[in-house]
Amino acid sequence: MLTILFDGVAYGMLLFVLACGLAVTLGLMNFVNLAHGAFAMAGGYVTAVLMNRYGVPFLLTLPLAFLVPAVLGLALERTLYSRVYGRSHLDQVLFSIGLVFMAIAAVDYTMGSQQQLIRLPSWLQGRVEVLGIQVGLYRSFIILVCGILVVALQLVLTRTRFGSRLRAAVDDPRVARGLGINVSVIFAATFAVGSGLAGLGGALGAEILGLDPTFPLKFMIYFLIVVTVGGTTSITGPFLASLLLGVADVAGKYYVPSFGAFVIYTLMIVVLVVRPQGLFARAR
Amino acid sequence: MGKGDPMASHTVDTIAAALHRKGRWNVGEILFWVAAVASLFLLPERHLILNEIAIIGLFAVSLDLILGYAGIVSLGHAAFFGMGAYVAGLIAKHVVGDPLVGLLAAAAAAALLGFLTSFLVLRGADLTRLMVTLGIALVLGEIANQASWLTGGADGLQGVSMTPILGLFEFDIFGTTAYAYSLAVLFILFVMARRLVVSPFGLSLRAIRDNGLRARAIGVPVHRRLIAIYTVAAAYAGIAGALLAQTTQFVSLDVLAFHRSADVLLVLVIGGVGYLYGGLVGAVVFKILQDILSGLTPQYWQFWIGLVLVILVLAGRERLTDRVRGLWVRSAIRRRGGADAVPTAPVREA
Amino acid sequence: MTPALETMRLQKRFGGLTATDDVSFRLEKGARHALIGPNGAGKTTFINLLTGVLPPTAGRILLEGVDVTRLRPELRVRRGLARTFQINQLFPAVTPLETLGLAVSERMGGGRDWWRVVGSRREIVDEIVEVARRFRLLDVLDERTANLAYGKQRLLEIAVAFACRPRVLLLDEPAAGVPEAERHELLDTVAALPRDVSVLLIEHDMDLVFSFADRISVLVNGALFTEGTVQEVSSDPRVRAVYLGESVNG
């Protein structure tokens, strides 16, 4: 049972890294970016291609799995997304769905529709026994890496000037602008980092979550759940929500396999009905 | 200056007449339906695709009722479409093959689902709604997948055989009966929807969409109206799904897939939101586009659809659809400029 | 005599902030009552409490003697309480004709009617025309609300509330933002409101207050500071100090 908990935590932390960019984008720009999963997919494919075609070691691909989607995100944000910021939610939804469709079809065309298999380095394979629990090495690695990322994010947000500017801009962009904060730069940087993190998450998660062109749509609902249950006004909200979701999903699929998927959806609906602003969000 | 004053009653008459005119059909509309019926006779080799257009059109009109008239953005409208399809298919397979019975059952089931879920959907703001509608469609899709003993699961529901409509018209392989059937159903439902949107009820919906706070302040029972229209829209979508099941005699899991909700959204947006004909116009354009683009790159048609969406949004979809809407200038549902233009900044209630 | 509108120790707290502080207020039948106070005194909050948009923390609200404290906003409208908003809350894409038509239809029970065209009931059209005439909107009935001049929009704002045939009408700064040239029309129509409607007017514009009101209540920091006839209040030195001494946009 503790193994399940452990696996669930790993899964949850992975979800967090994947989804935190979306949370910040939504909180910051009030933009519903359903295409967020496409950046995750991009990162995953970077790692897969580098490893399978060019024999690059797993760890070395990770920085690129971050950078390539980050650059892609930056480019798209400056050219396309920024034009759609002030629009209605319907327009944003349509726009991001359009992007997702394009991304999926493009990847399908160039890479084929089969699952991308990533062979983990041998030192990450297998399990060890720690305090009587079966602990997967890879999942431990994920927890470690994601944990570091979470701490780093929290430090950046609370201890750096960029972080406080970001928080100001999330709270009230107009006032922030009035204080001389360059909000567009913050938007661009945040979007890039968020996309990069998603890409990193996609690469890390490829072995656990699977990787094929339908990834963005398959997992879109998960990201959205994290964001809506966790709220968009802090990092801790989505973090806790991701953990909750990860554990619930793994536990659900283990204990009641035929209803595994329902657990998540029902949980989401229940939470949204009871607290529409999310479980952890501060009341605005 | 009282009511007996001839001047006063002249003004009242003028205004009453003006209001009445808005309810009347204009030339453009009549031509549209004449063309639709004519296509039944003039394009015999196209009946199968025309049938699809009619079904998608009905589905899109049902979405327009909640999106264009009540302002509810739904990413899971396929839930009702799929519900209707499966119910109609199951009725035909296990109970009775009469199409009209299946249609009624599908409408009732979808309406019930719409009614029950409306309470969930109407809580919270835009984003929450998106999530909840998406979630409901996904739950239904998962149920259909799991309950393969009932739905046929990934293989689809087979053995759906229909008896002749009204005992007279048998479904043929050319799709003639199918198209006539779908077109007739579409027309009847459309006329009803059209009456609805020009009625006081429809007006109250537009008011709710434009400024819910104000609507409440003049006594409109906002919540109840929204539940009502959501239920009606669900029933319409269910009937569209039933038509698909009955005319193709097959139901697959695809009817509940996300892309179906996304596609119908696209269809409606292409044709224009909020004037009821948008769904029909969009259906025609969508199918033609699909035909052309599938010829170019058969498997990657999703790419072009995505591109169309992106361009549509970037170019400002209201400006594009306003031109189309200009054709219906004297139509009852006259709204220049689109619902998203908000110059006097009313407070939108979440 | 039962007052048209009454509050009993009405209170509204937002966390640590008390926006409405123990307000016991009476609006007599047929009154022309003004509510004044410095910015931030809580006048609009008070209106929101009266109409049910905000739930009170404590206290009661009685509409013609009936306790409506727990009643939903749209039901209070049915009982005869209507309001206007400080910033126009209208339907931009809809015409004044349709706006008034909606208010009248809802009142006459035709709101649920989904089969008949708006305007097929004669009595509704009669009502619309009468209200439009009273508020000088006959010539702009068929234009999109968003395209109207601000003064006309303001008139429509009041007209729509009036079309609900309220017994109590709450006007939240009706003259706010109306250009000088269009004020006259506005002030005339407000002055010409029938006497069977009890009116509570929130205003900064002292001209309007003095020409329109019989009684004035002064709200300061959410509490009723003082109350009396126009004479009494305008000559009260404390009121002058608190409020009239501030610069007022006339």
Image (cartoon, rainbow, N blue to C red):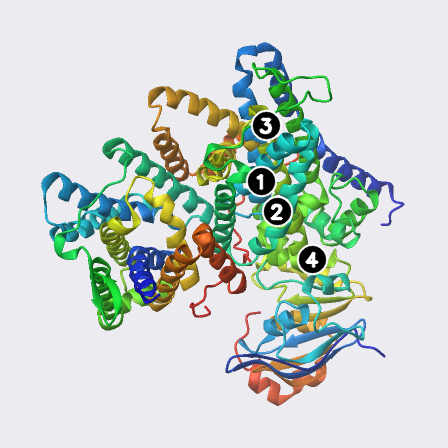
Q: Which of labels 4 and 2 is toward the front?
A: 2
Q: Nearer the viewer, mark 4 or mark 3?
A: 3
> Which residue is labeled 4 in the image?
B218
- Pointer 4 with pointer 3, Cβ within 8 A: no
Q: Please report, as a chain letter, where disc 3 is located.
A: B
Which quarter of the rendering shows the C terminus of chain A? bottom left
x and y percentages locating residue B288 in the rendered image: 46, 22
Q: CA distance from mark 4 to mark 2?
A: 30 Å
Q: C212 or B72: nearer the eye?
A: B72
Q: Secondary structure at mark 3?
A: loop
Instruction: Kindly identify which numbered label has been placed on residue B160.
Output: 3
Label 3 sits on what residue type?
A: Val
Viewer-closest of B283 and B9: B283
Label whose residue precedes the other's in the sequence (3 or 1):
1
- Going 47% across and 24% down the picture, which residue do you hit? B287
Disc sitting over residue B113 in the figure: 2
Q: Secondary structure under badge 2?
A: helix
Helix or strand or loop: what does disc 4 sit on? loop
- Image vertical order of residue B123 relative to residue C211, above or below: above
Residue C69 visible in the shown view: yes
Task: Please tell me whether mark 1 sits on a helix, a strand or a loop.
Answer: helix
The tag earlier along the polypeptide, 2 or 3, is 2
Q: Is residue A54 above or below residue A121?
A: above
* Vertical position of residue C201 compared to residue C140: above or below: below
Q: Amino acid at mark 1?
A: Met
Q: Are marks 2 and 1 in contact (CB under 8 Å)?
A: yes
> Between marks 2 and 3, how big is the CA–CA gap?
23 Å
Say which label, 4 or 3, has the lower sequence index. 3
What is the CA distance from the residue labelled 3 to the residue labelled 1?
Answer: 15 Å
Occupied quadrant, residue A51? top left
Q: Quadrant of residue B182?
A: top right
